[in-house]
Image: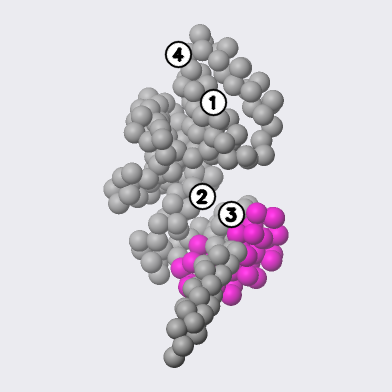
């Protein structure tokens, strides 16, 4: 076979695999657009049952039907007991349902398997805050920031700032929010810079009120 034909076939195969890899997630797209009925129809087409049930859990949670959402997450976990997304999403749902002790138990189990996962740590901080265990929440946040400062995402910094603010740790909140603004600018994210800067200035002015 001609060498050029071989190279052409290889190129076509590579292009096809890349195209498939980059195919947009329609379910996520509909969820982001809040078109939940369309998202449900699209999710039902998913052949991977665990993935399908996780999608449906997310959709019904967004719709405010927590009971049905919980049922679908549990179905996903029954199929795949190690399904990280379903387990983590169930913990988030338990938090929304104000079942904080159950949420914390799930997060503790997940952390044993994924000890470096920063989303788990940040969510654990929130749950401890809701349980009025503020010292635990602060300790987890501090450790998470100290160990992962370089890899925390834009939105993780925003979450950390918000929680520190709720905990009246304004200096730490200001530092986290400063990272949020800086990283948002670097990534050209559409945020209201003036509003964000005003909030940062407010946090800095509150430093003397820390407990």
Disc number at residue 61?
A: 3
**Mark positioned earlier in the residue sequence (3 or 2):** 3
**Crowdedness near tag 3: few (<14), some (14–19) or many (≥20) residues, C-alpha within 10 Å:** many
First along the sequence among labels 4 and 2: 2
Check disc 4 and report its element: helix, strand or loop: loop
Q: Distance between the residues labelled 4 and 3?
A: 36 Å
Q: Is residue 25 above or below residue 173?
A: below
> Which residue lies at the image location 49% right of the left edge and 47% below the top edge?
92
Q: How many labels does the image show?
A: 4
As for residue 126 lying within the magenta part, the answer is no
The residue labelled by disc 2 is 93
Percent x, y for residue 77? 41, 63
What SS does tag 3 mark?
helix
Which residue is the site of mark 4? 211
Tag 1 residue: 178
Residue nearer the viewer, 16 or 38: 16
Of residues 142 and 71, the one drawn nearer to the viewer in this rendering: 142
Q: From the image, which quarter does the C terminus lie in?
A: top left
Q: Position of residue 144 (x, y in %)?
A: 37, 34
Of the pair 111 and 196, the residue shown nearer to us: 196
Looking at the image, tell me whether mark 4 or mark 1 is earlier in sequence order.
1
Which residue is drawn at the image coordinates 45% and 38% (left, top)?
152
Residue 75 shows in the view: no
Q: Main secondary structure of the magenta part?
A: helix
Question: Above or below — where is 160 with respect to 85?
Answer: above
Q: In this view, does 165 lie above or below 126?
A: above
Q: Give how far apart the Cα atoms at labels 3 and 1 are.
A: 31 Å
Mark 1 lies on a secondary structure that is: helix
Which stretch did the figure color magenta? 26-54
């Amino acid at each position: 076979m001609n060498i050029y034909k071989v190279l052409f076939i290889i190129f076509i195969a590579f292009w096809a695999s890349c195209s498939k890899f980059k195919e947009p997630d329609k379910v996520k797209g509909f969820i982001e657009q809040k078109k939940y009925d369309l998202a449900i129809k699209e999710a039902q087409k998913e052949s991977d049952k665990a993935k399908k049930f996780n999608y449906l859990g997310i959709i019904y949670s967004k719709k405010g039907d927590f009971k049905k959402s919980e049922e679908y997450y549990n179905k996903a976990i029954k199929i795949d007991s190690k399904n990280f997304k379903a387990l983590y999403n169930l913990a988030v749902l338990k938090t929304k349902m104000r079942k904080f002790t159950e949420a914390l138990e799930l997060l503790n189990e997940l952390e044993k398997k994924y000890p470096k996962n920063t989303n788990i740590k940040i969510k654990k901080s929130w749950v401890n805050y809701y349980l009025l265990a503020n010292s635990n929440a602060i300790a987890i946040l501090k450790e998470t920031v100290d160990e992962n400062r370089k890899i925390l995402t834009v939105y993780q910094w925003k979450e950390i700032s918000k929680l520190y603010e709720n905990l009246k740790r304004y200096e730490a909140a200001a530092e986290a929010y400063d990272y949020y603004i800086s990283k948002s600018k670097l990534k050209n994210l559409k945020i209201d810079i003036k509003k964000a800067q005003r909030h940062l200035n407010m946090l800095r002015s509150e430093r003397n009120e820390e407990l």
